Every structure is written in structure tokens, then in C-alpha cells.
Amino acid sequence: MNSIQTPVLTLLRRLEAQNIWRMTYNVGGAVGQSGFSTAAMSLTDETTALENSREWYEDASLTAQDALKLLVNRIRENGPVKQRHLQFLYQRCQSPEELEKALRLTRLNYLARGELQQHDSFSHRTSAVLLHEAMRLGAPELAQKVLLQSGEFGLPGANTRHFNQLLIYHSKQTSLRSMLETYEMMKRAGPRPDSETCFILVKGCVDGGRPDLAKLVIQEFEAVGVRVRPGTKLYIEQHSK
């Protein structure tokens, strides 16, 4: 079945690719008529040969920057790539800046899918891998962006487990304010906090030297009918001075 041409998505895809190329190659000159600079469009013979012979992620020496160049070119020439390419790209990133570029490529791939009338969101695994790598690289603000703007990147809507991951990160960093701000953001965004959320918050408050806040958290959860585990209250008793 032939795909329906959608000029708006085609234009968006071109603009997204152009932005990614500029970020990747640091191209500062004028962009050609096609929307891409000549320098950005040229891949090395070695990279092209790799793309044709085997999947890029089988080569451990290939950097995230190399993979980004290859995948932008592949999407531009052949359409959207499979989700495993995005997941491997996230795992190959070594800095928040690289992961930010990978997120831009996720949007580019989503737009390319839309051009083929493929409107289903990416899998929850793709979201989970992206969030995990954001935590690994110490980029909670990027994780927050993914959670609040998931639809923009074709990712499934954030759920309670996703927000709990971010709460755990802040708890481990003993960043009490960031943890509580994330909790408020979670409530506004829609996912319903659960008993695991309660334990994470209580542990973070206690470890941050505020058992008084931990008790208030328990009161709030009990007031809205969320079951509080016995171990959650026990944590306050065992670790409060």
C-alpha cells in the first residue's frame, strides 16, 4: 500500500535532520538548497561500507557521534529505522550532550514514521532505556523533558514507574528539594503515586535529615487511600535519630 504524502511532516523531518547535522558536525556555514550542508552530507567510505555490511552497533569502536551521523543519513535516505537502533544509540552515549542529540534523532525518526502513516508510539522499553541512560549520565533534566514531553518524541506517556525512577535518582543524590519538586510534577502530570513512590519519598526525606517531612508524606498518602507498606514506617523508626 502506497504511503500518503504529507508535506508538513516532510518539511518537519527535513528541518529536524538539518538541526541534528548542524549539532553533530558543528557546521556554521550556509545551508544548501536541499536544506543540508555539503560537509554534513558527506559520510566517509568506511562508515558507508559499515552501514552496508553489518549493523553499526556490532562495532564497539563506533562512537555515538559516528552512529548519529549514520542514522540521520539512513533516515533521510531510507525512512525510519527500527527502535533497536535508538536503544543502542542511547547506550552508546557518553555525555548528556550526546544523549540530547540522540533524543533529537528520536523525534526525527518519529516524524519519518508519521510520513509513512505509522502513528503508533515507540515501545515502553525504548522509553525505559532512554530514562536509564539519562540517569547514568547525570542528566535528570533530560529525563524530566522526556517524561513531560513524551508525545513530541513519539514516546509512550509517562507512567508511575517512570517517575519513580527519577525520584530514586534524586533520592540517591540526597537532593531533597529536587525530589519533592519531581513528586509535585508527577501529580500534575497524571500518573498516580503508589506505595513504591511513598517509600522512595520517605527514604529520601529520612536520608536527607528530615524525618518530619517523611511523616507528612505518609499522612498525605494515607489521606488519599494509598496503602503504605509497614516497612516504610519502619524505615523512619530505624533511621531517625
Image (tube, rainbow, N blue to C red):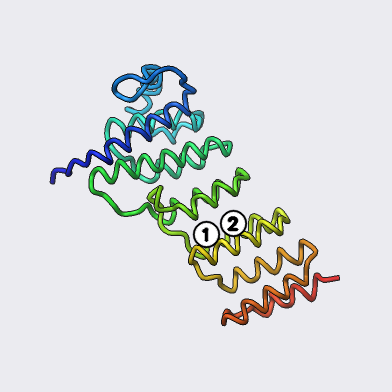
Q: Does 123 appear above or below 22?
A: below
Local crowd size for mark 2, using a 10 Å CA cut-off: few (<14), some (14–19), many (≥20): many
Residue at 76%, 67% (x, y): give it: 206
Residue where numbered disc 1 is placed = 162
C-beta proximity under 8 Å, tags 2 and 1: yes
Between 123 and 190, the one lying in front of the other is 190
Disc number for residue 166: 2
Local crowd size for mark 1, using a 10 Å CA cut-off: few (<14), some (14–19), many (≥20): many
Residue 216 position in % (x across, y down): 71, 75
Residue at 58%, 58% (x, y): give it: 165
Residue 186 position in % (x across, y down): 55, 63
Q: Seen in the image, is 62 located left or right of residue 6?
A: right
Instruction: Name the secondary structure under disc 2.
Output: helix
Q: Seen in the image, is 209 located left or right of residue 159?
A: right
Q: Does 194 appear above or below 158?
A: below
Q: Give residue 105's quadrant in the image.
A: top left
Q: Amino acid at mark 1?
A: His
